[in-house]
Image: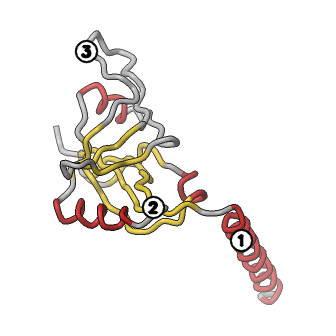
Amino acid sequence: MPREVGRKLVAQNKKARHDYQIGDVFEAGLVLTGTEVKTLRAGRATLTDAYATVDDGGEAWLINANIPEYEFGTWRNHSARRTRKLLLHRAEINKMERALDNSGRTLIPLSIYFKDGYAKVEIAVATGKKDWDKRRDLAERDAKREAERALATRNRYNRR
């Protein structure tokens, strides 16, 4: 059977980009069981309440990510919200630890995907946004959308 090539998105944490100011982004491998991989290939996962940590031993962990039980699994099925180990280089883990030393920062997963057949998770060092930050971002996005609309209608009538 030929090997998969490219990137196939499984789950995305859209709420994270709304609630957090995204800093450094890292790509990490995931340590998964067989039934978890089958569930991910079926496109079933949720990252809404998930976060990542670096423990005292210098290992990174993905906590509270919901990968539902495999529906055709047996008694060897995995638990849905178990803690999963992240595979990162030592330098990346050290960089994360230094970034997390600053107060108000956390590690959040942005997406889970398959890259060339391997399950990967994209995690970011993030700072929580205040309500006024969120309102300002929405206002900027709306203003940009209105400007693009006005420009499009202007260009449409100038061609005639």
| Residue marked by disc 3 | 76
Left or right: where 99 falls relative to 150:
left
Per the image, the residue denoted by label 1 is 136
Taking the spot 24% from the left edge, 59% from the top edge, the residue there is 93
Rounded to the nearest angstrom, the CA distance separating label 3 from label 1 is 49 Å
Amino acid residing under circle 1: Arg
The amino acid type found where label 2 is placed reads: Arg
Q: Quick one: label 1, few (<14), some, or many (20+) residues within 10 Å? A: few
Task: Classify mark 2: helix, strand or loop.
Answer: strand
Q: Nearer the viewer, mark 3 or mark 2?
A: 2
Q: Is residue 133 above or below residue 73?
A: below
Which residue is most to the top? 75
**Which three-letter amino acid code belongs to the residue tagged 3?**
Arg
122 on left or right of 104: left
User: Upstream in the sequence, badge 3 or badge 2?
Assistant: 3
Task: Look at mark 2 in the image and give the residue it sits on.
Answer: 105
Residue 156 lies in quadrant: bottom right
N-terminal of the pair, mark 1 or mark 2, is 2
Residue 5 in percent (x, y) is at: 25, 52
Task: Pick the residue in front: 113 or 121.
Answer: 121
